[in-house]
Image (cartoon, grey):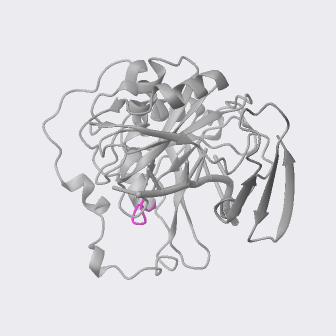
Amino acid sequence: MMQPAPGAVPPPPPPMAAHQYQYQQQAPPQQQPPPQPSPYMMMMPPQPQAQPPAMWATQAAAPQAAGVAVPPQQQGQPGEIRTLWIGDLQYWMDETYLNTCFAHTGEVVAVKVIRNKQTGQIEGYGFIEFISRAGAERVLQTFNGTPMPNGEQNFRLNWASFGAGEKRDDTPDHTIFVGDLAADVTDYMLQETFRARYPSTKGAKVVIDRLTGRTKGYGFVRFGDESEQLRAMTEMNGVFCSTRPMRIGPATNKKTVSGQQQYPKASYQNSQVAQSDDDPNNTTVSTVVIFNIKNPVFQTFVI
DNA sequence: GATGAGCGT
């Protein structure tokens, strides 16, 4: 059932190179010669200088995905999650683009890109609804982490959470910041670089610039074990990932697992810390006073 | 050099 619906764009050649994530693929798609440009015509990024911003809100409604008609009784179990979330979209990656990426799977029911209500700009993420959970799962396994057509980044896909975060593990994350990343480092490379030594590595993310689709040169790695996080901070500093040595630092968490608010970054940046210096050996309790310039409040912690 | 983001009608 991987046929395109009538009237759909022709199926692109197996566009995504075989990839680590494809370990569950059954039969490889038949080999084909290099991509024709035509299937991707609609996916070309606009000329940067010719692109007036913020006029996209009034554009015609997005075409529905490729006319896939699904009898209700085939639509999977009620309540089952069959929508994927997609992130790291560049501003020109609209519904048409997503349809062209996925319609050929024959599994897509609808796509939607989220726009800013005021400006109409694409917010950088969207949703893809599938016929069934199985279809969504196939696409997730096949496409996630593979290069996006005409984008410089890889697909970032996940289950749409919709409150039912069934895939969640609620164990806390212990995250580190990793800087000085080479331009070719992907989430997967970063993750595997750490997983080799730290089995509790949960995942890694290289931060992508939404405007260019290119890496910002830093990222984050999450561990399940705090001890492995701490070891990695020292042991992996200066270790090569791809062509450059990584620089590792503590991650400033904007959000904790339980969702409660931490101190906003600005407070940290504008804070001055006074510490009593008369106890270099740290043998007694010392007091740290933080003066928050943004919110002129003194806070005293005993550490 | 740098501290994400990511849940909608």
Q: Residues in magenta? A: A90-94
- Give yes or no for residue A91 being in the magenta stretch: yes
Residue A91 figure quarter: bottom left
Query: Does residue A195 lie above or below A257 as drawn?
Result: above
The answer to whether one can see residue A126 in this image is: yes
Q: Main secondary structure of the magenta part?
A: loop
- Residue A82 location (% of width, % of height): 61, 38
- Residue A196 location (% of width, % of height): 44, 18
Query: Does residue A217 lie above or below A265 as drawn?
Result: above
Residue at horizontal 62 percent and vertical 75 percent from the top: A117
Q: Nearer the viewer, residue A67 or A228?
A: A228
Residue A48 figure quarter: bottom left
Quarter of the figure with the N terminus of chain A? top left
- Give yes or no for residue A11 being in the magenta stretch: no
Q: Looking at the image, which residue sits at the far front?
A: A278
Q: Looking at the image, which residue sits at the far left?
A: A33
Residue at horizontal 51 percent and vertical 48 percent from the top: A86
- Residue A129 location (% of width, % of height): 56, 46
For the image, the number of numbered tags is 0
Position of A277 with respect to A152 (left or right) is right
Residue at horizontal 46 percent and vertical 51 percent from the top: A67
Query: Does residue A47 lie above or below A224 as drawn?
Result: below
Q: Nearer the viewer, residue A172 or A153?
A: A172
Q: Nearer the viewer, residue A158 or A7?
A: A158
- Residue A13 location (% of width, % of height): 23, 39
Residue A119 figure quarter: bottom right
The answer to whether one can see residue A107 in this image is: no
Q: Nearer the viewer, residue A243 or B6?
A: A243
Position of A39 with respect to A114 (left or right) is left
Quarter of the figure with the C terminus of chain A? top right
Query: Does residue A302 lie above or below A300 as drawn?
Result: above
